[in-house]
Image (cartoon, grey):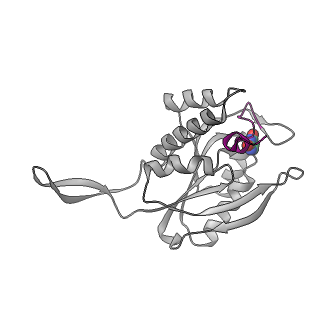
Amino acid sequence: MPVIAVAHPLVRHKVGLLREADISTKKFRELTGEVARLLAYEATSDFPLEKVTINCWSGPTEVDQIAGRKVTVVPILRAGLGMLDGVLDMIPNAKISVVGLARDHETLQPVHYFEKFVGQLDQRTALIVDPMLATAGSMIATIDLLKRRGCKDIRALVMVAAPEGIAALEKAHPDVRCWTAAVDSHLNEDGYIIPGLGDAGDKIFGTK
Ligand code: URA
């Protein structure tokens, strides 16, 4: 089950607010951050714990801590940057890897123009963030790049997914799980998700 639609009421409520046509840049950014935090919470729910003894106010006490997990958050430029801080709020020690992929508006294919990965990808969990899983071209290309560098635990966080993107992702990378806040109806002829959010990058950056 590589695509997991998060059904939490807070997530569903916030995605509804994001769909308002005349939403302000400030509100869109805030909600994107909030949804990213909740998706990060869901996507890390299987991280293993270990017991450590700490010096508590009442004396030595055994507590849980996440067991040696190294995380890199991977925003896909540019819209993925809108989700970055929300994920870092939950995983403050995560390192950041950046992938630049732009969508060719004619072919709808991703055009790769930048990458900067942190080291030890073979030992890390990668959390890719990109608000819209439309054709999934950028997501598939980013997963290809991470796998080529030895990353074995790759997870994706998106706010809205189209069935076409889900099918493409499941076909290309059946081992990669993707958490989404909503699964929408379809892609239109311009490659936009319907009902969707519109151009998430423009809404986060206030362009257009
Ligand atoms: N990218 C967006 O920003 N919106 C869509 O609907 C599809 C891709």
Residue 132 image offset from top left, x and y in percent: 68, 44
* Figure quadrant, ligand 1: top right
Q: At 74% across and 30% down in the image, what residue appears?
A: 195
Q: Give the magenta range.
A: 193-208
Q: Is residue 202 magenta?
A: yes
* Frontmost residue, 48 versus 68: 68
67 up-or-down from 6: above or below: below
Q: Would residue 46 appear left or right of 99 to someone viewing this image?
A: left
Q: Would residue 108 appear left or right of 39 to someone viewing this image?
A: right
Q: Is residue 151 magenta?
A: no
Residue 113 image offset from top left, x and y in percent: 75, 65
Q: At 69% across and 53% down in the image, what residue appears?
A: 78
Query: Toward which corner of the image does residue 17 lie, by quadrant?
Result: top right
Residue 153 image offset from top left, x and y in percent: 52, 61
Q: At 73% across and 32% down in the image, what residue appears?
A: 185
34 up-or-down from 76: above or below: above
Asked whether residue 75 is in view, the answer is: yes
Q: At 71% across and 66% down in the image, what residue appears?
A: 114
12 up-or-down from 85: above or below: above
* Frontmost residue, 183 versus 40: 40
